[in-house]
Image: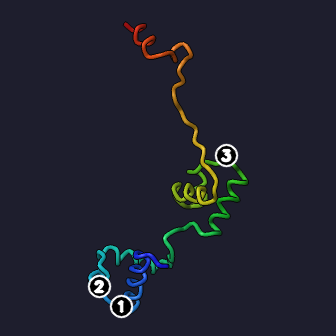
């Protein structure tokens, strides 16, 4: 079943194919002119779906991670020429998890007591 957005995109694509102006398409479909121009631009580039995470791309990400499990998301994105968000979503699609080093202050055992003890020592 096609979603409403996909149906509108297909309708705009069909109207663009018969060379109707962007202004008329926007009125017919009920979207902004900018949306019509975006759809036209995507068509001219040959972009079919809304994602670049094809099966081949996911397999490539999996192979890169398998080759070097310590590779960073930014470096992997730069190597694959996509954004780090795309790599992050691809890793999630693969069912894997991202680990980030968390920097935080560790409290000493002597300061981990109740709030009353630490507040009375500061007075």
Q: Quadrant of the C terminus?
A: top left
Q: How many marks?
A: 3
Circle 3 sits in a helix, a strand or a loop, which is it?
A: loop
Q: How is the image coloured?
A: rainbow
**Apparent side of residue 87 relative to residue 42 in the rendered image (left or right):** right
At 29% from the left edge and 79% from the top edge, which residue is drawn? Answer: 30
**Apparent side of residue 47 relative to residue 71 in the rendered image (left or right):** left
Q: Residues within 10 Å of mark 2 (few under 14, many from 20)?
A: few
Task: Compare marks 3 and 2 and give the one earlier in the sequence.
Answer: 2
Q: Is residue 77 above or below residue 32?
A: above
Residue 39 figure quarter: bottom left
Residue 67 figure quarter: bottom right
For disc 1, the marked residue is 19
At 47% from the left edge and 16% from the top edge, which residue is drawn? Answer: 114
Q: Label 3 to label 2, Cα distance in Å?
A: 51 Å
Q: Position of residue 57 (x, y in %)?
A: 62, 66
Residue 89 figure quarter: bottom right
Q: Residues within 10 Å of mark 3 (few under 14, many from 20)?
A: few
Q: Position of residue 95 (x, y in %)?
A: 63, 56
**Apparent side of residue 34 relative to residue 99 in the rendered image (left or right):** left
Circle 1 sits in a helix, a strand or a loop, which is it?
A: loop
**Apparent side of residue 22 relative to residue 9 in the rendered image (left or right):** left
Q: Position of residue 46 (x, y in %)?
A: 50, 79
Tell me, yes or no, if residue 40 can be seen here: no
Please state which of the two labelled residues, at mark 3 or mark 2, is closer to the viewer.
Answer: 2
For disc 3, the marked residue is 70
For disc 2, the marked residue is 28
Q: Nearer the viewer, residue 17 or 29?
A: 29
Task: Compare marks 2 and 1 and give the one earlier in the sequence.
Answer: 1
């Amino acid at each position: 079943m096609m979603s409403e957005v996909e149906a509108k995109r297909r309708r705009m694509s069909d109207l663009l194919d018969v060379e109707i102006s962007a202004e008329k398409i926007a009125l017919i479909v009920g979207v902004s002119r900018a949306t019509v121009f975006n759809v036209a631009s995507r068509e001219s580039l040959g972009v079919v779906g809304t994602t670049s995470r094809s099966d081949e791309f996911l397999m490539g990400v999996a192979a890169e991670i398998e080759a070097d499990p310590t590779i960073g998301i930014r470096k992997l994105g730069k190597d694959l020429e996509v954004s780090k968000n795309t790599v992050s979503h691809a890793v999630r699609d693969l069912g894997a998890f991202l680990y980030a080093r968390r920097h935080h202050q560790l409290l000493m055992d002597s300061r981990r007591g109740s709030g009353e003890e630490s507040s009375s020592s500061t007075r």
